[in-house]
Image: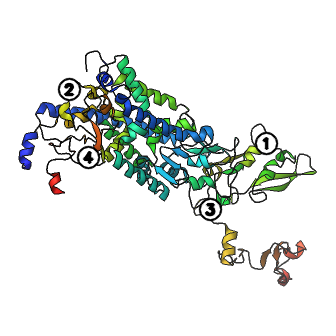
Amino acid sequence: MKAGARPGAEAIALKGRFAASKWLLARRFVQLSILALFLLGPWFGIWIVKGNLNASLTLDVLPLTDPYVLLQTLLSGHVPELTAITGALIVLVFYLLVGGRVYCAWVCPVNMVTDGAQWLRERLGITGASRLSRSARYWILGATLFLAAVTGSVAWELVNPVSMLHRGLFFGMGLGWLIVLAVFLLDLLVSRRAWCGHLCPVGAFYSLLGRYSLVRVRADRREQCDDCMDCFAVCPEQQVIRPALKGAEKGIGPVILSPNCTNCGRCIDVCARDVFRFGSRFNNRADFDERTHHSPGVEVLR
Amino acid sequence: MSVNAKRQRKAPNSASRRRFLVEMARTGGGVALFALGVGMYARQAASLPAQALRPPGALAEADFLGACVRCGLCVRDCPYDTLRLAKPGEPVATGTPYFTAREVPCEMCEDIPCVKACPTGALDHGLDDIDDARMGLAVLVDEENCLNFRGLRCDVCYRICPSIDKAITLEMQHNARSGMHAMFIPTVHSDACTGCGKCEKACVLEEAAIKVLPLKLARGELGHHYRWGWEEKRKAGGSLVTPDQPHRYNLPEGERYDYEGQGLIMEDKGGEVPFGDDPLSTLKRGMEGRR
């Protein structure tokens, strides 16, 4: 990244504005489409999807349930009906395939709020971070599960900004705007990516699924990297890139295996040298050859 | 690499260990505060206002707050827009469904779509007859303003009741004010009232005299050891206490007590009466032989 230039400027110059934002645009399209699907009912009476992210029913046949909220229900001592369990299993399998924190980058409505805060933060040149721990979210996740068990109620749902925003858009916001505003201001003023990257237990829950999920960002052409730092500048979870991108000498493979990578694909967009691409978690040998897409020796086994 | 060698390689120096511990304590402390706050708020939020009624089949409030995932599917399938999800800032636990009888009461759909829509069973799927629903209990809270209690024939709550003559009956009483009329008192029966709230909605007063209250507020509870004697007697087919013994009065010989026989009865023993009709004969008693 040249001094003073915005991250991705080089990629835009090289690939064109569209190609250098295609995953960002795809992501916004998916996020807005999901919101639109939920809004068609309450606004226009076209009921394709009912409910909200906690539990929904699509076309009167497909139940989907947030496994995190269902886990809290279980811990509170309630055995749910089969519909909710089926819905949670479908969601679990889906995110195990596409990546746990795909929920955060492609589905969660708060992502647009915090991305907005981050954009403004950069524009205003706000720097300096309070020392929030990246692991705080797991403590908070544990605390919410503990609270469910101790209070016998889904206590986290009283304050959860994620479901509050999503539910509020279809069922009435009330004072929920204040909580969304608080998250925005937190990310804008207190710490870079404070909510999604440090505190949110929903993301923490989905990241645990991400430990085993299939679809990954891969730094397959990492030898092309010219250390421009653009990917690092745009990444909401900066710590996940380095092992894969710079690990060749240490014998680390090119797949970004950190469960906290949200598969947002922004690094793919902004890289002028096309180091990154979406792929699977397999073929993660340090000596992976990008041109054949196989590790040496794999052919022999066929 | 052996475990020992690994440990040695990773052995942290004391400065970084201290930093790690401080970091842990900081995060842990912050999260503990957060949990305390949310936990206390959760206790607060568990107190449902009396006029907020849960949908049909809702589990008891404490269980409901654990079972409901706040998805709003019951709200969506309510054909009369009775149900709403509580918004943040309202005095009902955020995201949970409720209705206010005075605004939109429950129409008691026969197929109970709200219960069918519930994915978790927070609304009990075992409820298959809407008449078995117990969303609350109607209580005539204000006898002073109820028109029927003043001797008028308003009867609106009675007429509108979906279980007319079962959940609400009119009981005739003497009108003491006029001295010559009857009053027809709307009387709610808990064995039939579903708490749908149509009576509260229909009450013609500015503020309803009949209100649906949560069962916990509306009902008393007998001492668990209480038994109704007459019911126990009927069940047993006879009195359960010892049959009556004739009472024994501790009276002097020759006297007895019988209420119907006009009380204390002196039995005539021929001259053994302590005081006869003629006082003289009493005075002379025992003197006969001295003449």
Q: Residue A291: x, y in percent? A: 20, 41
Q: Is residue B129 visible?
A: yes
Which amino acid lies under the numbered mark 1 shown in the image of this protein? Answer: Glu
Task: Quote the CA–CA distance across marks 2 and 4.
Answer: 24 Å
Mark 2 in CB contact with mark 3 (< 8 angstroms): no
Give a yes or no on whether discs 2 and 4 share a subunit: yes
SS at badge 2: loop
Q: Nearer the viewer, mark 2 or mark 3?
A: 2
Which residue corresponds to mark 4? A281
Give a yes or no on whether discs 4 and 1 share a subunit: no
Which badge, 1 or 3, comes first in the chain's sequence? 3
Question: From what the image shows, is residue B260 above or below residue A215?
Answer: below
Q: Nearer the viewer, mark 2 or mark 1?
A: 2
Mark 4 in CB contact with mark 1 (< 8 angstroms): no
Q: Quadrant of residue B286?
A: bottom right
Give a yes or no on whether discs 2 and 1 share a subunit: no
Which amino acid lies under the numbered mark 4 shown in the image of this protein? Answer: Arg
Task: Quote the CA–CA distance across marks 2 and 3.
Answer: 66 Å
SS at badge 1: loop
Label drawn at residue B144: 1
Which residue corresponds to mark 3? B128
Q: Which chain is disc 2 placed on?
A: A
Q: Residues within 10 Å of mark 1 (few under 14, many from 20)?
A: few
